[in-house]
Image: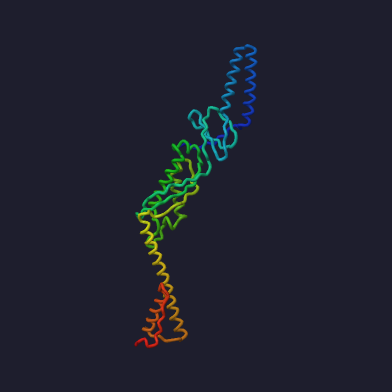
Amino acid sequence: MIREVKRTVASGYLMLVVLTVAQLLFGYLVYTQIAAQSVGGTIASILVSIIVLICWAGLFMVHPNEAKVLQLFGKYTGTCHDPGLRWANPFYTKASVSTRVRNFESGQLKVNDSNGSPIEIAAVVVWKVFDTAEALFEVDDYVNFVQIQSESALRNLGTTYPYEPHDDSKGIALRSNPAEIAQALREEIQDRLSQAGVTVIEARISHLAYAPEIANAMLRRQQASAIIAARKQIVHGAVGMVHLALDELDENNIVNLDDERKAAMVSNLLVVLCSDEAAQPVLNTGSLYT
C-alpha cells in the first residue's frame, strides 16, 4: 500500500528570478558566439539555453487546502502541501488533489428495515482527503468511490435497524435514536473508505420515511399507538383522582359510603374523567336502591 510522503520543494519565486537571469545570460551568450562565428560555442550555448527553457516547466502553483502529488516516470516521489509558487524537477508529473472538506448527499434509497418494512432513507456525508497517495493510487476514482461506498453503507445500516421500536422495545431504531444511528453510519462508512485515504468527519440521516405503499397503514398504526398511550395516561390519572376523592371523604367524615355506593361513585367519576365529551350531570332526588 502506498502511503503519503510529504515533500518540500524549492520556492518558485526564487527559481523565477534564477531562471530569468539564466535565460537572459545564455541568450546573450548565444548571440556573442554567433557573432564570433564559433560553431562549438554556439551549439553549446544553444543546448544550455534549451535546458534552461525546459527548467521553466518545473514551476507550478499550490493553492490553499490543495496538494500536488509528484511522480517521476510513474514512480511516486512525494506530495507537496506548501501553498504558493513552487519549483520541482520539470520531468515530474504533478497531479492536484483537493484537501478541502466536502459533502455528499446520497439519493433516496428504498430498502427494507430489520423488520422487513420498506423505507426510504438518505444521508449526508462530510469527508476530506487525508492521504493523497492512497486517494490517487489505491482506488481508481476516489470521489466516485466515496459516493458508492457511502450508499452501500447506508443500505446496510437501513437493513440492520428497525424504522421504529415495536412493542416498547428498548433497542436502537432509525427514527428514535438519531445520535446513535449517525455514529454507527459514520463508523461503517469510515471502515469502507479507510483504504482510499479519506476520513469521514460526519454522517447523518437527511431523509427517513416509510415507503409510499405502506405509509398510510403505518400512519394509522402510529395514531393507534398514540391513542392507546394517551388512554393509559388518562385512566391512570383518573384512578388516582378517584382514590384521592374517596380518601378525602373518609378522612373528613363527609359521608359514609358502603361498598355498593362506593362502586357507583367510582363508576360515575371514571365516566366523567375518562369521557371524551363533557359529562351531562343527572340529579338523583330519590334513593339509590329505589
Q: Nearer the viewer, residue 276 or 247?
A: 276
Q: Residue at x 44, y 57 (%)?
A: 177
Q: Nearer the viewer, residue 236 or 1?
A: 236
Total numbered circles: 0
Where residue 141 appears, x then y in whole percent? 45, 38
Above or below 75: residue 179: below
Which corner quadrant holds the N terminus?
top left
**Image check: 251 left or right of 260?**
right
Q: Nearer the viewer, residue 224 or 54?
A: 224
Where residue 42 appears, x then y in whole percent? 60, 15
Q: Residue at x 40, y 52 (%)?
A: 120
Above or below 287: residue 87: above
Q: For residue 222, what is the image quadrant? A: bottom left
Q: For residue 220, what is the image quadrant? A: bottom left
Above or below 275: residue 123: above
Which coloring applies here? rainbow
Where residue 196 appears, x then y in whole percent? 46, 40
Q: Residue at x 48, y 38 (%)?
A: 135
Which corner quadrant holds the C terminus?
bottom left
**Image check: 38 left or right of 137?**
right
Where residue 181 appears, x then y in whole percent? 44, 53
